[in-house]
Amino acid sequence: MKKLFKSFIKPFLSKYEVVCTNYHVIPGMPVSQHQQTHAFDRGAALEAREFYVKVVSSEMTKAMAPVEVKLRKIYLGGKTIEQKQFGPVEQLKNVNSKKK
């Protein structure tokens, strides 16, 4: 009965994803960005949160600054649950928005 209930509820649960955005700065060139997305199944909030914590606490992530890491919940629209930035990410976003 419990398995049947879970299989009925699963399509209505949210999907989760961890998005890691690296910003590349080369003097004289526009700021470029590279996004990596790790998607998780519906209802996999615990696994997505564990992966997010692992990425944020990684020394490699901190050494690759400027980097932005987001944990997103996707049901009907995307919603950022948690976000962590390493380096001057906000300044780089402003530079990109001014040049467009």
Image (cartoon, rainbow, N blue to C red):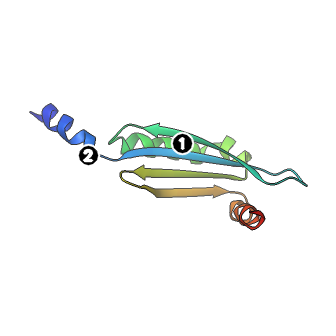
What's the residue at 41%, 51% (across, down)?
73
Identify the residue at the far right of this view: 28
In the displayed structure image, the side of residue 25 where residue 34 appears, left or right: left
Q: Is residue 36 above or below residue 82?
A: above
For the residues carrying marks 1 and 2, which lies nearer the camera in this image?
A: 2
- The quarter in which the N terminus is drawn is top left
Marks 1 and 2 in Cβ contact (< 8 Å):
no
Q: Tell which circle, 1 or 2, labels the residue nearer the N-terminal end.
A: 2
- Amino acid type, residue under disc 1 in the picture: Lys
In the displayed structure image, the side of residue 23 where residue 3 appears, left or right: left
Identify the residue at the far front of this view: 100
Q: Which mark is residue 12?
A: 2
How packed mark 1 is, by other alpha carbons closer than 10 Å (few <14, some 14-19, many 20 or more), is few
What's the residue at 68%, 41% (across, down)?
60
Q: Nearer the viewer, residue 48 or 93?
A: 93
Count of residue discs: 2
Q: Position of residue 98 (x, y in %)?
A: 75, 67
Q: Is residue 75 above or below residue 11?
A: below
Q: What residue does disc 1 label?
A: 54
Q: Nearer the viewer, residue 86 or 96?
A: 96
Q: Is residue 96 above or below residue 24?
A: below
Label 2: which secondary element: helix
Label 1: which secondary element: helix
- Amino acid type, residue under disc 2 in the picture: Phe
Q: Quadrant of residue 87?
A: bottom right
What's the residue at 55%, 41% (across, down)?
37
Q: Position of residue 4 (x, y in %)?
A: 13, 33
What's the residue at 78%, 64% (across, down)?
99
Q: Quadrant of residue 44?
A: top left
- The quarter in which the C terminus is drawn is bottom right
Q: Position of residue 75 (x, y in %)?
A: 36, 51
